[in-house]
Every structure is written in C-alpha cells, then in structure tokens.
Image (tube, rainbow, N blue to C red):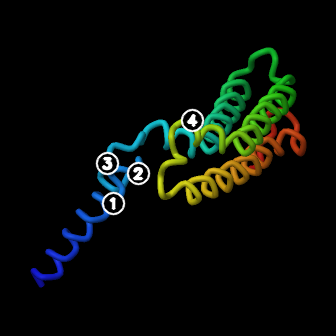
C-alpha cells in the first residue's frame, strides 16, 4: 500500500519538475483562480442577475399598487435584450477573456474554452426563456 503512495508522490514530483521550466501550471500551483472562474462563469452570473432582477421587479411593482405597472413588460423586454446581448458577447469573447487571465498556459485550456462556451450558450437560452413571460402574459398577471 505504501509503495503505491510513494510511486504517486514520485510521479507528482516528476510532473511538477517537468512543467517547472515550461511555464505550465500544474495542480497545486498558484493559478489565477478568481479571474479564471469569473471568465468561465460570467454568463451564468449574468443570467442569475437577470433572473433576480425580473422577479424582484415583477414582485415589487405588482404587489404594491404603484403607478408604472403597465411598463413592466417593456422593462422586462429591454432587460432581456441587454442580458441576451451580454451572454452572446460572453460566448464570442470567451477566448479573449481566457487568454487575458492566462488560461492558455494551463493544460485544461481546451476544457475551459468548451465549458465557457457551453455555459454562455445555456445562459443565453435561460435569459431568453426568463424574459419570454413578458411576451405571453400581461403585466401583473398571475397563473394561479
């Protein structure tokens, strides 16, 4: 059992030594975690902000009788177009963002690029789906 542990530690040291001069970060090195995470998760964060904005707006304007509730669908459509545009920009600018945070040097660059694009595409669909209710229902219409 201990022989396997020693072999794994030796292999990890060899891998780290092989990559040390190449500028390729390996597991356990100081990768730019926060910028890399933000570049990869920008579109889902945009969707979450869009989703929260829509529901807070609808809840606030429709719960209390305030003037301007008729403008809710227009505001939702504008917010949806802005959110969808930003998600699409995230899809197309993802490579530039990953390059800017240094992800090209990582061994997982291809995985990060594919993940970022899939998340951006999924977030685009989610933003459009969240805003579709404004086109189908009138302002302050509840389904129950």
Q: Of helix, strand and loop, which one carries label 2?
A: loop
Comparing 16 with 62, the one in front is 16
| Location of mark 2 (residue) | 22
| Location of mark 1 (residue) | 18
Q: Residue 13 location, x and y as percent?
A: 23, 63
Residue at mark 3 to residue at mark 4: CA–CA distance: 18 Å
| Label 3–label 2 contact, CB within 8 A | no
| Location of mark 3 (residue) | 29
Q: Within 10 angstroms of label 1, few (less than 14), some, or many (20 or more) residues?
A: few
| Location of mark 4 (residue) | 100
Query: Which numbered circle lies on residue 52?
Result: none
Q: Of helix, strand and loop, which one carries label 3?
A: loop
Q: Earlier in the sequence, mark 2 or mark 4?
A: 2
Residue at the image point whose x is 35% and y is 50% from the top: 21
Does 139 sit left or right of 120 as displayed?
right
Q: Residue 81 location, x and y as percent?
A: 83, 34
Q: Quadrant of residue 59?
A: top right
Q: Earlier in the sequence, mark 3 or mark 2?
A: 2
Does residue 67 lie above or below 107 as drawn? above
Does residue 46 lie above or below 5 as drawn? above
Residue at mark 3 to residue at mark 2: CA–CA distance: 13 Å
Residue at the limit of the structure toward the bottom, as seen here: 1
């Amino acid at each position: 059992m201990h022989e396997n542990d020693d072999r794994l530690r030796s292999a990890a040291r060899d891998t780290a030594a092989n990559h040390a001069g190449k500028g390729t970060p390996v597991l356990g090195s100081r990768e730019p975690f926060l910028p890399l995470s933000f570049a990869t998760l920008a579109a889902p964060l945009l969707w979450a902000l869009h989703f929260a904005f829509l529901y807070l707006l609808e809840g606030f304007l429709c719960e209390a009788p305030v003037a301007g509730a008729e403008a809710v669908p227009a505001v939702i459509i504008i917010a949806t177009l802005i959110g969808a545009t930003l998600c699409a920009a995230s899809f197309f600018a993802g490579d530039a963002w990953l390059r800017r945070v240094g992800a090209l040097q990582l061994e997982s660059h291809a995985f990060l690029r594919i993940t970022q694009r899939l998340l951006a595409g999924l977030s685009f669909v989610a933003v459009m789906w969240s805003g579709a209710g404004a086109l189908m229902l009138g302002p302050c219409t509840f389904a129950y």
